[in-house]
Amino acid sequence: MNNPTRHPTAGFFRRMGAIFYDGILLFSLLFVAAIPAVVLHEKFVGRPLYGEPAYYPFLVSLYGIAFVYFGLPWIKTGQTPGMKIWGIRLESTSQRPIDWITALKRFIVAMISWLLFGAGFLVILFSRDKLAWHDAASGTRVVKT
C-alpha cells in the first residue's frame, strides 16, 4: 500500500462528487437487480413485495449488492468508478492492504452516517485530518491521486 503521507487527504466536495457519481451507478444497478424480484413476486403471489416476509431478505440482498459494489473496488484498487473520475483513492492508515473486514466496517459506519443525515460525512468539513466517521472506524483515509 502507498505511504499515507505521500498524497494529501481528499476534501469534502471532491468526495461528495465521487459519492454522487457512485450513487447514480449504484442506483441503476440496484434498480435492475430489483426488477426480477418485484415482478416475479407480484406475478406469483399477487401482492406487492413490500410488507411481505420476503421483503426483508430482498432488502438484505440489495445491501449486499451495494456492499460488493463498494467493497470489491476498495480491496482491489482502492477506487470505485466515482473515485477514479474524481481523482481520489482509499488507502489504509496502517500500511496493510484493505481487506473485507475493513471494507465492511467502512460500509456499515457510512450507512449509519447516512441514516443520521450525513453527519459522519459533515465532520470532514470541521476536522483537521479530513476523516469521516467511516474513515476513522476502519483505519482508512481518502487521498487525492
Image (cartoon, rainbow, N blue to C red):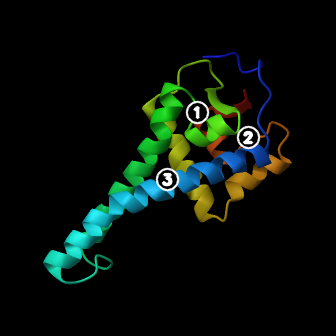
Query: Vertical placement of 27 versus 82: above or below?
Result: below
Disc 1, SS: loop
Q: Earlier in the sequence, mark 2 or mark 1?
A: 1
Q: Is residue 45 toward the left or the right of residue 51 in the image?
A: left
Q: Earlier in the sequence, mark 1 or mark 3?
A: 3
The residue positioned 54% from the left and 26% from the top of the image is 77
Question: Dot 1 corresponds to which residue?
Answer: 79
Quadrant in which the N terminus appears: top right
Q: For marks 2 and 1, give the CA distance.
A: 17 Å
Q: Which mark is residue 111?
A: none
Q: From the viewer's perspective, is the residue at label 2 or at label 1 nearer? A: 1
| Residue 18 picture location, percent across and down | 66, 45
Q: Is residue 1 toward the left or the right of residue 44 in the image?
A: right
Find out whether the residues at labels 3 and 2 contact each other: C-beta distance under 8 Å: no
Query: Vertical placement of 80 versus 40: above or below?
Result: above
Q: Amino acid at mark 3?
A: Leu
| Residue 4 picture location, percent across and down | 72, 21
Q: Amino acid at mark 2?
A: Leu
Q: Is residue 79 toward the left or the right of residue 46 in the image?
A: right
Q: Which mark is residue 26?
A: 3
Disc 2, SS: loop
The residue positioned 58% from the left and 64% from the top of the image is 115
Q: Amino acid at mark 1?
A: Gln
Q: From the viewer's perspective, is the residue at label 3 or at label 2 nearer? A: 3
Q: For marks 3 and 2, give the CA distance.
A: 23 Å
Question: Dot 2 corresponds to which residue?
Answer: 131
Q: Earlier in the sequence, mark 3 or mark 2?
A: 3
Q: Is residue 29 toward the left or the right of residue 98 in the image?
A: left
Q: Residues within 10 Å of mark 3 (few under 14, many from 20)?
A: some
Q: Residues within 10 Å of mark 1 (few under 14, many from 20)?
A: many
The image quadrant that residue 90 belongs to is top right
Find out whether the residues at labels 1 and 3 contact each other: C-beta distance under 8 Å: no
